[in-house]
Image: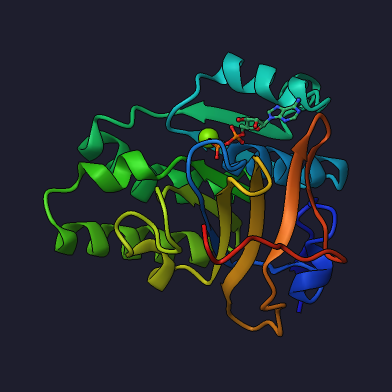
Amino acid sequence: MIRVSTGINGLNEMIDGGIPAGHSVAIIGPPGSGKTTFCLQYIWDGLQKDDHCLYISLEEEEDRLLQTAMNYGWEFKKYIDRDMLSLIKLDAFDITGTMDRMLSELPKLINKNGVKRLVIDPFIHIEMGFADDHKRRVNIYELIRRLAKTGVTTLITTENLEGVHSHFGILESIVDAVFLLQIIRSTERGALIYAFQVNKMRWSAHSKDIKPYAITGRGIEIYRESNVYWSEKE
Ligand SMILES: Nc1ncnc2c1ncn2[C@@H]1O[C@H](COP(=O)(O)OP(=O)(O)O)[C@@H](O)[C@H]1O
Ligand SMILES: [Mg+2]
C-alpha cells in the first residue's frame, strides 16, 4: 500500500509511515490549534516530493494564505508559477454554489491536473450552511465518495470548541481518519498545552497515545517521546 507522508515531524511514525494514498483525513481542533498550519505543512511536504497539490480555502484569501505559509518559511509562490500548486478561495457563505463546485468541478480538476494532495480548510463554514443534519450528512458523504474515486489524499479541517468531537459530529464518521488537536488550558502550569491524538485511521495500526505538540516558526512538531500531563483537578 502506498502511504503519503504528512510532513509533520513525529507523526508518520505514529501512523504506520503515513496516510494511505486516496484516504481522507479530518483534522479537528479549536481556533489556534494549528489546523491551517498542519495543512500548509502537508502541502509543503508534497511539493518537495513533486506531488501536484490543491488547497481549497474557505476562509483566508490566496495572498493571505501565501503570507501565512511564508511565516513558516514555506515559499509557495514559485510552485504556483510552475503549476505544481493551486490555491483556490471559494465563497463559504454561498453554500449551494460552493457545494456544487466541490461536487462537480473539484473531481474534474483533480483528475485533469493529476492532483495527489488536497486540502479543504476550514470545512466548518460549509457544514454550518446546511439546513439540517440529513442534508449535511448526504452532501458530505457524496463529496468524500467522489474525492475517494479520484485517488487524491485529502485533509479536511473542522472545528470543535471543546471535547473530542467535531461541532456537528458527522465528518469523523465519513472520513477514513481523524486527527484531533486539543488545547488544554493548564492553570497549574500557567500555560496552554497542545495535545495531539489519532482518533481513527482505517487500514492502520496507529498509535493510540495522546502526545504533546508545538507550533513554532517552522510549523508543527509532535513530541512522540514525551507525554501530555495535566492535573485531573483542573
Ligand atoms: N511563527 C510562529 N511561532 C510560533 N507559533 C506560531 C507562529 N505562527 C503561528 N503560531 C501559532 O499558530 C496559531 C495559529 O495556527 P493556525 O494553524 O492558524 O490554527 P487554526 O487553523 O487551527 O486556527 C497561532 O495562534 C499561534 O499560536
Ligand atoms: Mg485555520
The answer to whether 116 is drawn above or below residue 134 in the figure is above
The answer to whether 14 is drawn above or below residue 154 in the figure is below
In the rendered image, which quarter is residue 129 located in?
Answer: top left
Residue at the spot 42% in from the left edge and 53% down from the top edge: 162
Q: Position of residue 12 (x, y in %)?
A: 80, 65
How does the figure colour the protein chain or chains?
rainbow
Residue at the spot 60% in from the left edge and 14% down from the top edge: 63
Q: Quadrant of ligand 1?
A: top right
Residues 64 and 153: in front is: 64
In the rendered image, which quarter is residue 11 located in?
Answer: bottom right
The answer to whether 227 is drawn above or below residue 73 in the figure is below
Q: Looking at the rendering, in which quadrant would you find the N terminus?
A: bottom right
In the rendered image, which quarter is residue 216 located in?
Answer: top right
Disc count in the image? Answer: 0
Q: Position of residue 200 (x, y in %)?
A: 55, 75
Residues 27 and 48: in front is: 27
Residue at the spot 72% in from the left edge and 77% down from the top edge: 207
Residue at the spot 21% in from the left edge and 39% down from the top edge: 96
Please give left or right for residue 185 compared with residue 69 in the image: left
Residues 1 and 45: in front is: 45
Please give left or right for residue 149 compared with residue 23 in the image: left
Residue 186 seen by the camera? yes
Residue 114 seen by the camera? no
Please give left or right for residue 75 compared with residue 102 in the image: right
Q: Position of residue 48 (x, y in %)?
A: 87, 42
